[in-house]
Amino acid sequence: MKELSHFINGKHVKGQSGRFADVYNPATGEVQAKVPLASPAELQSAIADAAKAQVEWGNTNPQKRGRVMMELVRLLHRDMDKLAEALSSEHGKTLPDAKGDVVRGLEVIEFCIGAPHFLKGEYTDSASPGIDMYSMRQPLGVVSGITPFNFPAMIPLWKMGPALTCGNAFILKPSERAPTVPLMLAELLQEAGLPDGVLQVVNGDKEAVDTILDSETIQAVGFVGSTPIAHYIYSRATANGKRAQCFGGAKNHMIIMPDSDLDQVADALVGAGYGAAGERCMAISVAVPVGQKTADALIEKLVPRVEKLKVGPYTAGNDVDFGPVVTAAAKANIERLVQSGVDQGAKLVVDGRGFKLQGYENGFFVGPHLFDHVTTDMDIYKQEIFGPVLSTVRADSYEEALSYAMDNEYGNGTSIFTRDGDTARDFANRVNIGMVGVNVPIPVPLAYHTFGGWKKSGFGDLNQFGPDAYRFYTRTKTVTSRWPSGIKEGGEFTIPVFN
Ligand code: NAD
């Protein structure tokens, strides 16, 4: 059995705790590796070494830090196939989708090459006669990222790129379900010139996470995962005086107006609802057609498309639309929720139950499901399913459709399909959700904007990547300076007022 490691001080290090988690190949259901779960002592030692390494890295000029990212971009392109293969084998997503996972992370690394621009600070010449004032953005020291299984390349890269180019050392605690790609990213960063100890990848579970949250050295925690854990991490990290930005789960609605092109909508929905087996925080899980005629026509167009979806292992290359879900437990949870939908009265118009794939009987495959006549009191509406299940909630008017998205407790992404600019504009302005698509089903912003959900999809006040990340991973110091005279003229005992 392959035993994975941590990546500490520039090398692979065996786990010392004696505790391991199984890493599956979801397509076959086999355990393909064991990942060590770090003890608090292992973590504390990695954090202490990171703090030592940070001093020189923080003093390295920003342009040189940016150049490490420039080289990382080249190496990510060089190793794209290897990374995608490792990613698919642990996550289950198709190879083209795994490459997309790497590319959306790589785009943030490209943005980070320009870090010096965000670290320039601000300067006021002659704030008062002879007095200048300037603000610097300084690194926080040692910061951390705790990441989910569903984007094993993209999300660690979203966190590492900005944190490191700000001059911080970074402790990454990746998902124990997909740990190989984060370890490969650490190797690539070392090859790109990152000094040893500045990035420590420490594998683990709750014990490791709690050690991070309680560490006096770690200054900030960036988390992505499910909402209950996001809330827990936000509460404990902030109670300990750390900065925290914690992104959680989602229930993304797509509003379909009667004037939309329903073929375009149906194509968009199968990609956004079933791609990556629905294991995306920006997946569309709820379709809201406006008007009974729109709903009937949409279902008619969706059913054959959903029935035709090809489910299979990543080794089939371009021949599959989506792969298995990540674990047997995830599969069982999806099946439980599908059954609850049937029991609570939703109409299962495409029934993927009992899906089996010859030769892969032990894999964690789930067939595609489509529900119609879902209501907001049903568990399939209230809970994040994170599987290949699309629910249709029929609305009689635009206002009713908008209220479903607005009243939902999650606020990650949403989308509207319409040919009417006025409706689209009204929707984008009023909806209380962080990322909005207009005739775009998965509106993931590019690297120079920022990514973040509202309501229970995000705790904290700054988004991921883009300019916000440079605010999150630095702190501002403001210097007021007077040269050359005046300072020696005696003390002033009232608060200075600049006239
Ligand atoms: P998860 O919450 O189970 O795990 C995320 C991380 O938290 C992992 O590193 C895990 O080891 C750690 N963790 C798990 N349980 C913990 C506990 N009790 N105490 C401390 N740490 C714990 O999430 P997941 O299943 O890996 O990922 C899927 C979830 O992530 C979905 O809910 C999805 O919507 C969400 N997600 C959100 C975004 C976003 O940007 N909003 C992006 C991707 C995924």
Image (tube, grey):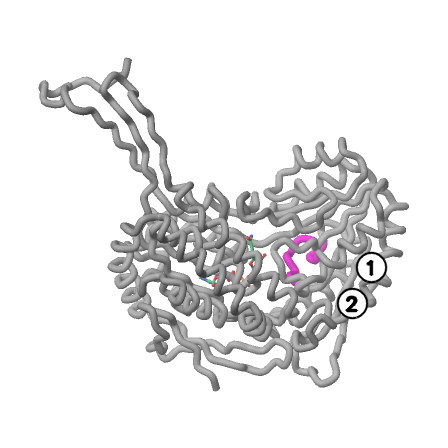
Residue at 71% x, 85% y: name it.
359
Gap between marks 1 and 2, in whole Å?
A: 20 Å
Residue 262 screen position, x and y as percent: 85, 49
Q: Residue at x 30, y 55 (%)?
A: 57
Report crowding for label 1: few under 14, some 14 to 19, many 20 or more residues within 10 A (C-alpha): some
User: In the image, which disc is placed on residue 395?
Assistant: none
Label number found at residue 347:
1
Q: Against 299, is 339 above or below?
A: below
Tag 2: amino acid: Leu
Q: Is residue 379 left or right of residue 75?
A: right
Q: Which residue is mark 2?
A: 309
Residue 80 lies, with reference to residue 395, above or below; the image says below
Badge 1 element: strand
Bounds of the magenta segment: 378-386
Which numbered mark, 1 or 2, is in the foreground of this view? 2
Whether residue 108 is visible here, answered yes or no, is: yes
Image coords of residue 187 (percent x, y): 41, 69
Q: Secondary structure at mark 2?
A: loop
